[in-house]
Image (spheres, rainbow, N blue to C red):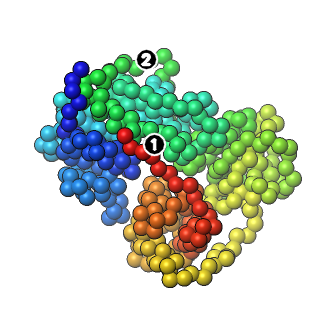
């Protein structure tokens, strides 16, 4: 066994996950010779780029690595010039050419959020839940020229909770344990103990990358299957159905254990029985007669409402708060964050975060920057439920006052 040593590493990826892996590898004493990430969005760099730039590490922002299936020569030469001994790909949405993957002495390792060979593909966490798997996990593997087919370095597993969503499973296990495991994998490579276990073909699945148009909720299934489908798409891309001619997206589903609720019947396309809107939400019916409760609904334009209020006229700006000087400072800091993410000069109370083009990654950034600049912790759901700046400010101030505290997500690095 080789003695553990410092490696020269190129980190190829993006997002806060990539940033935290980068920070952990530096903490473990490895030399990050360069970070390769995505271009800035709305003139704002990715979090991995921000972290590396703050440390004076070389940052390269390639829009693409290939043209017409061939590696771009100048991109390849710039990569080779950094002298990496190992590529670490913690969260990588770009296709990395094999000329890059195999170039370093120790080649490359990649994180994939499923127990390979099951759920190969870009929507692995979604499919784990949508198909009702009892176990979830992640794999760190050595990429080859296939889709998530390379030899396995390590696997970590966890039980799937009955009401896990993509978001909760990622936050509870796949994110924090994944960061730690990437650090462990690099340590094993440095020590000469990292295995290369060929993936079995038995049990292998390739799952489609999910987009909104592909996740119309199949209501001709049992209640358990409907629940699994909804939670597997919660928050992204969001399972939906047609109600009153509108595409309505479902969030926060749970199997209903009590009797049929009293409320207003709402016909829903594809279901043999109308949904019921009641004081606790909306209830859907499976083909087995059992029921699923839904807490929140997404409406066209990105607005999210409590499912219990579907069909009601929603008042904008209701319940405006009187702000003291400290709270006005918080409001203006939040306004600045919105201005930066949306790349807008003016942010009014009726400015809608999603109508201005924001997506799920912008929600993650908004939550992180609010935490950093305002010392307040919000969930992603709170952003979706408060999509206009006025409503977002109200949610933020109520959190500051202790009226609506959110549970902080943290992990302890190795």
Q: Residue 297: which numbered mark, if any?
A: none
Quarter of image, res 380: bottom right
Closest to the camera, between mark 1 and mark 2, is 1
- Estimate the spatial distance between the alpha carbons at disc 1 and disc 2, rounded to whole Å: 25 Å
Residue at horizontal 44%, vertical 38%?
A: 177
Q: Position of residue 168 (x, y in %)?
A: 56, 45
Residue designated by label 2 = 200
38 w.r.t. 300: above or below: above
Q: Nearer the viewer, residue 108 or 28?
A: 28
Please indicate whether residue 47 sits to the left or right of residue 75 in the image.
right
Residue at horizontal 36%, vertical 47%?
A: 20
Residue designated by label 1 = 175
Please indicate whether residue 382 sits to the left or right of residue 76 in the image.
right
Q: Earlier in the sequence, mark 1 or mark 2?
A: 1
Q: Position of residue 357 (x, y in %)?
A: 47, 63
Q: Residues within 10 Å of mark 2 (few under 14, many from 20)?
A: few
Describe the element under mark 2 as helix, strand or loop: loop
């Amino acid at each position: 066994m080789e003695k553990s040593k410092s490696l020269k590493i190129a980190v190829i990826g993006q997002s806060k996950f990539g940033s935290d892996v980068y920070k952990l590898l530096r903490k473990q004493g490895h030399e990050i010779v360069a970070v390769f990430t995505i271009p800035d969005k709305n003139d704002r760099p990715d979090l991995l780029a921000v972290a590396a730039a703050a440390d004076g590490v070389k940052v390269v922002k390639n829009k693409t690595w290939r043209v017409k299936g061939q590696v771009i020569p100048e991109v390849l030469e710039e990569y080779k010039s950094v002298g990496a001994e190992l590529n670490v790909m913690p969260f990588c949405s770009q296709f990395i050419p094999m000329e890059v993957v195999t170039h370093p002495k120790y080649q490359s390792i990649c994180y994939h959020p499923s127990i390979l060979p099951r759920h190969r593909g870009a929507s692995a966490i979604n499919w784990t839940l949508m198909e009702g798997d009892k176990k979830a996990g992640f794999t760190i593997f050595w990429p080859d020229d296939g889709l998530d087919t390379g030899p396995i370095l390590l696997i970590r597993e966890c039980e799937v909770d009955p009401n896990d969503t993509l978001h909760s499973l990622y936050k509870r296990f796949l994110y924090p344990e994944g960061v730690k495991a990437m650090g462990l994998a690099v340590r094993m490579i440095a020590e000469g103990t990292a295995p290369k276990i060929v993936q079995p073909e038995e049990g292998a699945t390739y799952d489609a990358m999910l987009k909104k148009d592909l996740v119309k909720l199949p209501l001709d299934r049992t209640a358990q299957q409907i629940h699994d489908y909804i939670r597997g798409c919660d928050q992204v891309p969001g399972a939906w159905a047609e109600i009153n001619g509108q595409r309505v997206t479902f969030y926060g589903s749970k199997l209903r254990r009590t009797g049929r609720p009293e409320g207003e019947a709402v016909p829903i396309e594809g279901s043999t029985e109308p949904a019921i809107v009641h004081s606790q939400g909306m209830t859907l019916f499976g083909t087995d007669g059992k029921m699923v409760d839904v807490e929140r609904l997404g409406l066209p334009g990105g607005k999210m409402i409590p499912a219990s209020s579907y069909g009601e006229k929603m008042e904008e700006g209701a319940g405006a708060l009187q702000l003291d000087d400290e709270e006005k400072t918080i409001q203006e800091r939040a306004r600045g964050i919105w201005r930066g993410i949306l790349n807008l000069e003016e942010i009014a109370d009726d400015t809608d975060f999603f109508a201005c083009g924001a997506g799920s990654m912008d929600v993650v950034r908004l939550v992180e920057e609010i935490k950093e600049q305002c010392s307040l912790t919000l969930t992603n759901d709170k952003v979706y439920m408060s999509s206009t700046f006025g409503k977002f400010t109200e949610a933020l101030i109520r959190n500051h006052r202790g009226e609506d505290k959110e549970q902080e997500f943290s992990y302890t690095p190795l």
